[in-house]
Amino acid sequence: MAKRVHSFALNKCQKGVCIAEDRISQLPDEVLVYILSFLTVKEAANTSVLSRRWLSLWRYIQRLDFDASKPLDKVALQPKLRKSQMKKYLRWVNYTLQMCKGQRLDQFRVCFDLNKFAQHEIDKWLKFAFSRNVQRLELDLLKGGEDIRYFDYCYTFPTRLLRLGDSVDSSSCIPHSNDLQIPPLVKQNFKFLKVLLLKSVNVTGEVLEFFLHNCPFLETMVVHGSGTLVNLEVVGPSLKLRHLEIQYCYYVKSLKICDTNLVTLRTSAGEALLLKNVPMLVEVYISSAAYNHILNDISSCLSCVISQLEVLKIHGSHSLFDLSQENLEHYNFPQLTKLKKLVFTTFGQKDLSLLGCMSIIRAAPQLKEFELHLMLTCSLQSNRECRKAIKCPLHHLKVVKLCGFYSGAVHLELVRYFLENAIALEKIIFDPRNPILSRVPLEPSEIEEEQTARNLAKLHLEGEVPPYIELVIL
């Protein structure tokens, strides 16, 4: 009998009467909305065509990531398209927010080339996001999607949104007739914020300190390219903040970080930096245009944390940030007793030796990784004889990475130094690509230069590196 039933079912399928059961649509709305939140906004919206069951589900998604990488790529190739693409982007975000019905947001991300002329629109978006108790807020408004714009043209974060100062009036939170219908904001609307990212957004220290002291779960704060940030205090053991970035904010006069459990710090405001009692700080990225400023920052501003750092990244201008053997060979660098990773990013010049940076490596007896990002606009081959630095055994160094165009003796003498001194060396990586990324595709001549750099590195280094050490040429 069982055999007959099986045969009958098979015949039904062969005749095309088998109907697949839609078990996904049988799931509760909450589960389906959770699944949709992992899709892009456009992908989630497209599910509305599946059936009536799916018609409105996407409107309740809790992650609104308005990424526009493809339009930004188009603008990079054809700048004349910028204005039309911006209008499309504004319409897309406005329409989507009008359709959304969810009462909370895990993420709200704007990523497009927007400036002060979109002030009113972005103000509305922020009101929308905060009224939904947003946890992760990102305004990535870089020019062309990758460059800091002139401060005068940046979007300005609205202080009235936070009801700061005497400038706030009760009408400031009342929406216009064509705006999203959003109730007035109170401090409760901000308390769920965990991540705040603002790029090419003018924001004051008063606003940032509001978030620090009114958002008990705020762990990450990133500010790039603000022309109105002058003073900022990150003070108090009650702060949850673990990661702080203050980059390209050139008018900062004071950056005070005291009595906190900050773990990572990235800043270009080294001269304005005051650190005190930050026992958890183990990773620092510091950049400067001046060589002397960098040394002073590390020797003085970072003096209270220098012995506890595990990762140190330094970015400087090569014309001033001179890593030459003559200038740094005998420099008495402070001891970095716990440092595991050291990264240099610097501009290069033909024939200029970088062996001077070995003095810093010698001050880090536990170092395991070293990276040098050498930024060159073109390949500058140096045919001079290789120099030697003071010998010093590097007992724990395992990985060396050299990035940027291959420059003959400049790279070769570094490789020889590590081969002679790094007892535990396991891998040498060479990457000829320019560390400065761009949305504009490489020209054929640039691609050819990269390949030439690879070929020269292979020609010179393969004969130097022994087989028990892995040589990787990307």
Image (cartoon, grey):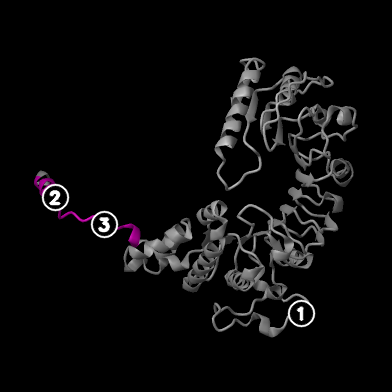
Magenta residues, start to end: 4-26
Q: Earlier in the sequence, mark 1 or mark 2?
A: 2
Residue type marked 2 = Ala
Which of the 4 image quarters holds residue 109? bottom right
Label 1 sits on a secondary structure element that is loop
Q: Name the residue carrying label 2.
A: 9
- Viewer-nearest of discs 3 and 1: 1
> Measured from the top left, where is residue 152 in percent x and y?
73, 65
Q: Name the residue carrying label 3.
A: 21
Circles 2 and 3: CB distance less than 8 Å? no
Residue 446, above or below 101: above
Which of the 4 image quarters holds residue 90? bottom right
Q: Is residue 295 left or right of residue 105?
A: right
Residue 71, above or below 190: above
> Measured from the top left, where is residue 459 in percent x and y?
62, 19
Label 3 sits on a secondary structure element that is loop
Residue 244, above or below 369: below
Q: CA distance from mark 2 to mark 3?
A: 15 Å
